[in-house]
């Protein structure tokens, strides 16, 4: 009986160690995934906060620019440009 008890305890200990390693690996994987998401959010925030107009180089974004663009089809078709 002592051998069976020893083997049962040893198997239990090995399973617990395996489960602990799997949990650590899963936590690391989730942590890396979360950091990648955070990096993407940060990069997006940095890109959109520039605030420089490509048409007139003003301190506003292009969709706030009042300067008409000759390449804009809606502006030329609607007769906005003269």
Image (cartoon, rainbow, N blue to C red):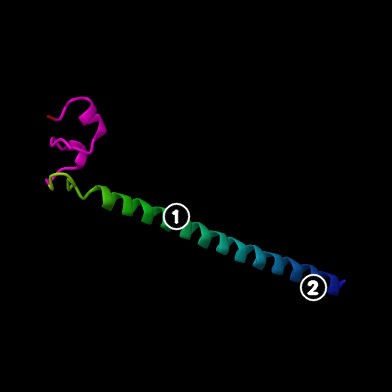
Q: Earlier in the sequence, mark 2 or mark 1?
A: 2
Residue depicted at 15% across the width and 43% down the height? 60
As rendered, which of 8 and 58 lies closer to the eye? Answer: 58
Is 65 situated left or right of 19 in this image? left
Residue depicted at 12% across the width and 45% down the height? 56
**Is residue 8 depicted above or below 45 in this figure?**
below
**Is residue 47 depicted above or below 65 in this figure?**
below
Look at the image and tell me in which quarter the C terminus lies.
top left
Residue depicted at 79% across the width and 73% down the height? 6
**Is residue 34 depicted above or below 70 in this figure?**
below
Residue depicted at 20% across the width and 41% down the height? 62
Residue 36 in the image, given as x and y percentages of width and height: 42, 57
| Rendering quarter of residue 78 | top left
Numbered range of the magenta stretch: 58-81
- Circle 1 is placed at which residue position? 34
As drawn, the label of residue 9 is none
């Amino acid at each position: 009986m002592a051998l069976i008890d020893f083997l049962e305890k040893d198997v239990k200990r090995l399973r617990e160690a395996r489960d602990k390693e799997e949990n650590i690996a899963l936590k690391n994987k989730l942590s890396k995934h979360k950091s990648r998401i955070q990096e993407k959010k940060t990069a997006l925030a940095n890109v959109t906060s520039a605030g420089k107009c490509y048409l007139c180089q003003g301190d506003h974004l292009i969709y706030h620019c009042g300067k008409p663009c000759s390449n804009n089809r809606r502006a030329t078709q609607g007769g906005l440009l003269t």
